[in-house]
Amino acid sequence: MNKNVELKTVYIEHESSYIEVCPYCREKSLEIREVVHRQPYLGRTLIVSKNCKKCGFKKTEMVPLNPRKRRIVAFKMGGREDLHVKILRTSTATVLLPELGAVIDPGIDAPYFITNVEGLLSRIEDALERIRVLKISQEGEGEIVKIKRLIREIKEGRRGLTIIIDDPTGLSDIFAPPGKVIREYVEGR
Ligand SMILES: [Zn+2]
């Protein structure tokens, strides 16, 4: 992950914080922090973090101040060397992995994250492990074992992988060499 450090250089343009009434516990204990960042690739973004000191309610949102059109980025992984290809994914993006039958829905935990293909696969493995621990069903167990095997084969370079990111803000990207990635702007949200 150290190689990603240069992508994380962030300049703070503006910062403010104030206390509001919490929508959950109704106490005036919700700390709202607004920061305008200037970030590589994302441009100017407003990060709004809400944190209630009373009930623990927490939420972080990212509002791109220079959004682009909705964009779909598709990447076809070749060999093992592509495991290190970097991925920038905003919280508004949906990630599709057709070979694994997996879809990562837009999330609210982190406004955006930068990882690489290997890191993305590890996140899915972790999620599968959490599902397995919950022991949903016998049939689900078989499916989890199958996807884990596919991920292992991809990590060993024995199987290909397609990654498709659909982002309404058009900011998510896959930093693959030319020829391996397609970027297409589409109409609508
Ligand atoms: Zn609260």
Image (tube, helix red, strand yellow):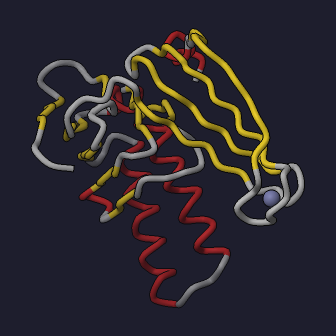
Mark count: 0
| Residue depicted at 87% across the width and 49% down the height | 53
- The residue positioned farthest toward the right in the image shown: 54
Q: Quadrant of ligand 1?
A: bottom right
Q: Which of 1/164 is in front?
A: 164
Q: Position of residue 182 (x, y in %)?
A: 13, 32
User: As rendered, which of 130 and 155 lies closer to the eye?
Assistant: 130
Give percent across and percent down for residue 118: 46, 38
Q: Nearer the viewer, residue 63 or 99?
A: 63
Q: Is residue 75 above or below residue 38?
A: below
Describe residue 94's horizontal placement relative to residue 34 as left or right: left
Residue 42 picture location, percent across and down: 40, 22
Query: Which quadrant does the N terminus fall into?
Result: top right
Q: Is residue 58 above or below residue 48?
A: below
Q: In this rendering, would 80 be left or right of 128?
A: left
Q: Is residue 79 above or below residue 42?
A: below
At horizontal 60% and vertical 65% (from top left) the residue drawn is 129
Task: Look at the image and tell me whether residue 93 can be seen.
Answer: yes
Q: Is residue 58 above or below residue 61?
A: below
Task: Please report the residue visible at 51 percent of the width from the left and 34 percent of the height from the top.
Answer: 113
Q: Please, which residue is most extreme toward the bottom here? A: 138
**What residue sits 52% from the left and 10% below the top?**
6
Q: Is residue 74 visible?
A: no
Tell me where residue 25 appears, x and y as whole percent.
81, 65
